[in-house]
Amino acid sequence: MKHFIFWFVLFCSVLWAQAIKPTPQNVPLCEIQDTIGIIHKGRILYVSDSCVIFWSSNKSYDSSKINDYTIVLPYSNISKINVSKKRSIKYPIGGCLFGSLIGSIIGYNAGKNDEFFGPGIFAALGSLSGGLIGTLAGTITGGIMRIESYAVEGKYENYRTIIPKIKKHTLFPFAPPSELQPFLVE
């Protein structure tokens, strides 16, 4: 039993460490609705003071296909930006562990006072069933996606206030690479 607990804790800690490691491929999917009502789906590459450079594909960014998938959206043409943030593996694992702990405690307390079979059997069964239910509920609750929505409505004041928030969700938050320079609208 000690070996199982050791390997389980080691496995969870490795998953947690991998989940919090930032990579360029973790840029969330976005939806940008323009003022006409067209919805563009993909990833934000870069945000400037006057426009958003957008990768309109679910595929990873590839500079050789930049002319095929890159869209430049001036702030005056943007109505709303929705960022779908998938939660990393640390949230379902944390929910699973917390749910199983709470469920086991509740299940044990519910089953320990049984007078017919004695406290041992029902305490174990209550702990097991409570732990399983808590694990399932915690995993589902921890794994739900979060959507951040930003309203621009074609107004520069709105766009300017959300630039720092959107830059957190871009592939190139600080400076665009040289291949994106021709797309910048001044």
Image (spheres, rainbow, N blue to C red):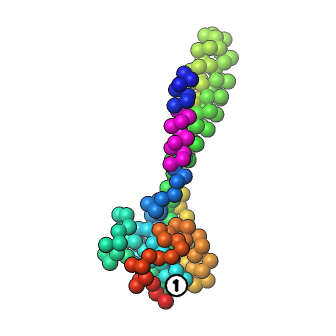
> From the image, which quarter does the N terminus lie in?
top right
Q: Residue at x 54, y 52 (%)?
A: 20
Q: Nearer the viewer, residue 46 or 21?
A: 21
Provide residue 49's location: percent of width, then percent of height. 55, 83
Total tally of numbered discs in the picture: 1
For disc 1, the neighbor class at 10 Å (few under 14, some 14 to 19, many from 20) is some
- SS for dot 1: loop
Q: Residue at x 47, y 68 (%)?
A: 171
Provide residue 146's location: percent of width, then percent of height. 54, 57
Look at the picture and state if 115 lies above or below 75. above
* Residue 82 visible to an observer of this rendering: no
Q: Residue at x 65, y 28 (%)?
A: 105
Q: Nearer the viewer, residue 19 or 120?
A: 19
In reply to whether residue 10 is colored magenta, the answer given is: yes
In reply to whether residue 157 is colored magenta, the answer given is: no
Q: Which residue is farthest bottom?
A: 186
Q: Which residue is farthest front?
A: 178
- Give the quadrant of residue 168: bottom right
Residue matched to label 1:
50
- Give the quadrant of residue 111: top right
Q: Provide the residue span drawn in magenta.
A: 8-18
Look at the picture and state if 147 lies above or below 18. below
Provide residue 139's location: percent of width, then percent of height. 53, 42
Q: Residue at x 61, y 83 (%)?
A: 157
Look at the picture and state if 84 lies above or below 19. below
* Residue 125 visible to an observer of this rendering: yes
What main secondary structure does the magenta stretch of the protein show? helix
Look at the picture and state if 19 lies above or below 7. below
Amino acid at pointer 1:
Ser
